[in-house]
Image: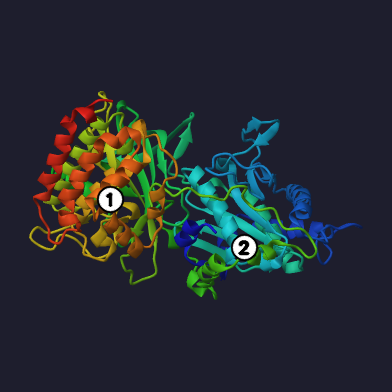
Amino acid sequence: MDQLLTQELGSFSVDVPNFCDVFFGGIQELDNISRTVFNRCLEGDDPLFNGKWTKWPVNPTQENVLPWFTDLVPKLEAFAACSGSAPTRRRKLLAQPSTPLLGSTGKRSMDIGFVNSDLEYEQAANHPRHRWSHVLIACELKCNPKADIASVAWIDLARYAREVLAAQDTRRFLLGFTLCGSLMRVWLYDRLGAVASERFDINTDDGARQFITVILGFLLMNEETLGFDPTIITADRQHYIEIERKGQKERLIIDKVMKRSSCVSGRATTCWKAHHEDDPSTPLVIKDSWQYIERDEEGELIQEATEKSVSYVARYYHHETVRIGASDDDVKDNVRRGLDVTKAPNRQSGRKKLLLRAVLPTSTSSTLEKGQGSGSKRPSSVDDTIMPPAKRSCSTSSMTTAPNRIHRRVIVRDYGKPIYEASTRAALLAAFECCVRGHELLYKAGFLHRDISTNNLMINEDAENSSWPGFLIDFDHAIKIRRGSVSGAKGKTGTRAFMAIGLLNGEIHSFMHDLESFFWVIFWICIHYEGHGKSVGTVKYDHWNYDSLELLADIKAGTIANEATFLSRSETYFTPHYKPLIPWVNELRKRIFPNNQAWKRENPRLYSSVLDVIQQAQKDEHVKTQ
């Protein structure tokens, strides 16, 4: 069971009425084409369909269904061509269930899917190797109709969706289907979760017509309908976006992907390094993310901070809500096209079944993957172990209405790399000092960041880069505050592994919590990395990414409660590169946790106390010597 994916998706919305009408009804002439193709399937002495698909295997194992599927789809496409409606986009089936696709952290393969027929793939050991970045539509096959549940087919397809969405930086959502025995569902995976059609039996007249509509629809859909972002344009081997800024249209050339979150549901942040087409020497960063609509706009907060001349914080360039066609690109109305998932009769059943599987013996769920008298279906992954993510955000802010996310774009004019990629210990500490100063200046300007983490502290060691030497990014969770009032807001917000003890226990978010998060960031870096950001792999503390908030609060309180124990653990777990920082990290511990306990009262002078430790550490000869 992939616990993180289960937690991320929550419930599945299945049996949603009108799903296929919404996603396939707008394809020109598809209904007429499908009717014509179905009639062709009834013709001849040996028709393809005669009350059921005539060559449908008696024992519908994966090994038997795959040849049937790969033989049938080209025939349906040929029938469509004979009717004068050949798909203009050449696509083909990818059916290599025993060959892992490239571009994943694990060895994961996919049962069947659609890819472009003209794509270039890599050769390895004389076998074609496709990548997750090639997949247009993902499909999961199960031989047993009883596998059409959350804990089996649905979560397997969700794993494919996560791989595809992570590998394709311009993908907004993914369509796919499950086929359990002869029972089919069509699926949508987007930034609010998973939605599925009512299931239908492809071995009935109505189900066969629907099956043909779905398959031909996937062949006819354009890239935008399949979920790609049309505002990111490709021409002359360049990717670019166009924005309206200060009354002028600007073209920003995308240089490379910096970050793409590996998730299905959530903010799904993507960052690209870019530059203005007329100024290639000045780096920009384009950030796309899917925000809850009721949140303050990150771009507006960064713009105001820049106007107030806050140093050591990423500086504003532009922000906008992404528009697809004539509409703001949100999930409920644009991606789901107004589909009413509240009418799904068992909307919450997915989560309950997923949680049930987590406590069932493995054999219980695996029996659902077996056919009548046949062997078990091949697992969807050779190695289903998922490394804990570098960032696992947590936010428990309440919502009074059904959730919706909107696609927002922010562009800043400071470019760097995560602070843990610092070339030396001294460089790390210098950038760390800048980030603490930036946080203090931000707080004095009336903002609270609320998400201090390894990915939100940046370093710039390029002498030709005019960005700050160290700076804060990511205002996704930031809020405006009033001086003289309680400094924070309710809600457990931040990146789980770096959240302060009091915050984990439900305290109102304060600047003091963020200062404590700085401590957990440097503690984490010293355990997880050697020089130049080289990760040491899995370590004892990785479970902090997914422990319950209450348990994590207790663990952290125990970590800092005794100096001798803290020093002993630091000697054991700090990497050789960062062992010279042990006395200084311990000194930070004493400043931030007086009397070996979580702080009780706000103390604005803690900023200067923390900065004093960092400055002293930079002068330490053991720290400076590499």
The image shows residue 487 at horizontal and vertical percentages of: 15, 60
Identity, as a three-letter code, of the amino acid under mark 1? Thr
For residue 184, side relative to residue 530 (left or right): right
The image shows residue 283 at horizontal and vertical percentages of: 30, 31
Residue corresponding to mark 2: 362
Quadrant position of the C terminus in the picture: top left
Q: Answer few, some or many: residues within 10 Å of disc 2's Cα (few below 14, many 20 plus, some between 14 and 19).
A: few
Label 2 SS: helix
Label 1 SS: helix
For residue 31, side relative to residue 397 (left or right): right
Q: Is residue 455 visible?
A: no
Compared with residue 419, is residue 601 higher up or lower down, i.e. above or below? below
Residue in the foreground of this view, choosing between 303 and 94: 94
- Image point 22% across, 27% down: which residue? 624
Q: How is the image coloured?
A: rainbow
The image shows residue 52 at horizontal and vertical percentages of: 81, 65
- Image point 61% across, 51% down: which residue? 138
Residue corresponding to mark 1: 565
- Residue reaching furthest to the top: 464
Numbered disc in front, either 2 or 1: 1
Quadrant position of the N terminus in the picture: bottom right
